[in-house]
Image (cartoon, helix red, strand yellow):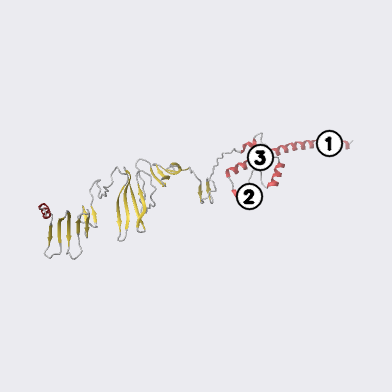
Amino acid sequence: MKLREKMLFVLFSVAVTNANAQTKTELRWVGGTPYIALYNDASIDYDARIILNSDDALVVDGAKVGIGESNPTSRLTINGLEGSTSSLLIRNSSYTSTQSTGTAALQFAFADHVGPKLEAYKITSNATGLKFYTENGLNVSKLALTIHPYQLLSEAELFSLQKTGSNAGLQVHSGSNNSSLQFIRYGVKHAGLVFDGSTIIFKGMSGGEDFNPDLTLNNSETVNAAFLGNVGIGTRDTKGYRFAVAGSAIAEEVVVKLQANWPDYVFEAGYKLPSLLELQLYIAQNKHLPGIPSANEVNESGIALGEMNVKLLKKIEELTLYLIELKKENIIQEQAISKQQELLLILQKQLDAKKHE
């Protein structure tokens, strides 16, 4: 052995043994490998052991380790520094800022299998995210939560919150800008909830990634709805109608604005009013008024209130015209009867006069 190597060995080899040879502390350098060992008797297991070996591994066995903590209460206790310095840093030095992929993970394990894993990952050279994997059987293969600040992700399979008490279980905070919560399917925006300080807006997708406001709730107790699809209350099948209610409904007032012409055209000079004889023949043949749905049609399709009101008003206006015509005929008949009565009186006077001659 060269003199320099002998000197290094002597310099880094220290052993302390007590009188009864039950414990020993050793610090040495063997073949280029640093070695620190805390022993009990060699015939039994180590109570405490610190080894720095040639595999770049640090082994701490049978002890509680404190970093910045003189009385650790667990296997590893870290008492962090004040300020913005991280208490624990997990670094992957194999990846640099110029590379687009890379991970640094923290994982938990049990005696017979590994457990959940928290993984920081890179997608682009300047964008990082966070993934949380949970167990699926004994394999950590089920992705439970994905967080990424810059791009849409469709990887998360499950996200669950459970809490008790009065504080918010989930809070979305964005400072001075609008706070929003978005729902994503296969990387495409499908719905969202936005709060702009005074109004809550539920947005649904109209096409691509465009958002149109569907439901608005504001502090004036006003609800504005502009649903792109149909709305059903008590039913999922709206039968193609924009709004369907399975059951009863009540309101103090319902306003219907129709796009069709209001039937005032019945009173126009060119309107052809069917004669009462024609109406009689139609009723005898069809058992309902012209332009009014039959009982079978109502049972099958229901009644459109706005359209039905138009048809009923048309019939009322036609009936009004019939009454006006009948009134005219009655006036003419009354005039004719009055003239006939005058003639009868004249004839009666003439007959009476002849009788007295």
Which of 295 and 66 lies nearest the eye of the viewer? 66
In this image, 357 relative to 54: left or right?
right
Report the disc number at residue 318: 3
140 in relation to 177, above or below: below
Q: Where is residue 188 in the image (x, y as percent from the top left)?
A: 42, 45
Determine crowd level at label 3: few under 14, some 14-19, many 20+ residues with C-alpha closer than 10 A. Answer: some
Query: Residue placed farthest to the front in the image?
Result: 1
Distance from disc 3 to disc 1, alpha carbons, whole Å, reads: 43 Å
Which residue sits at x=30%, y=56%? 108
Q: Earlier in the sequence, mark 3 or mark 2?
A: 2
CA gap, disc 2 to disc 1? 61 Å
User: On the image, which quarter does residue 343 sit in?
Assistant: top right
Q: Where does residue 3 sit, x and y in percent of width and height?
A: 9, 53
Image disc number at residue 296: 2
Q: Taking 96 as reference, is 1 above or below it?
A: below
Residue at 60% over, 50% down:
300
**Amino acid tagged 2:** Asn
The answer to which of 105 and 89 lies nearer the viewer is: 105
The residue under label 1 is: 347
Q: What residue type is labelled 3?
A: Glu
The nearer-to-camera label among 3 and 1 is: 3
Q: Name the side, left or right, on which 117 lies relative to 43.
A: right
Where is residue 168 drawn, in percent x and y? 36, 50
Task: For residue 311, say whether it is visible.
Answer: yes
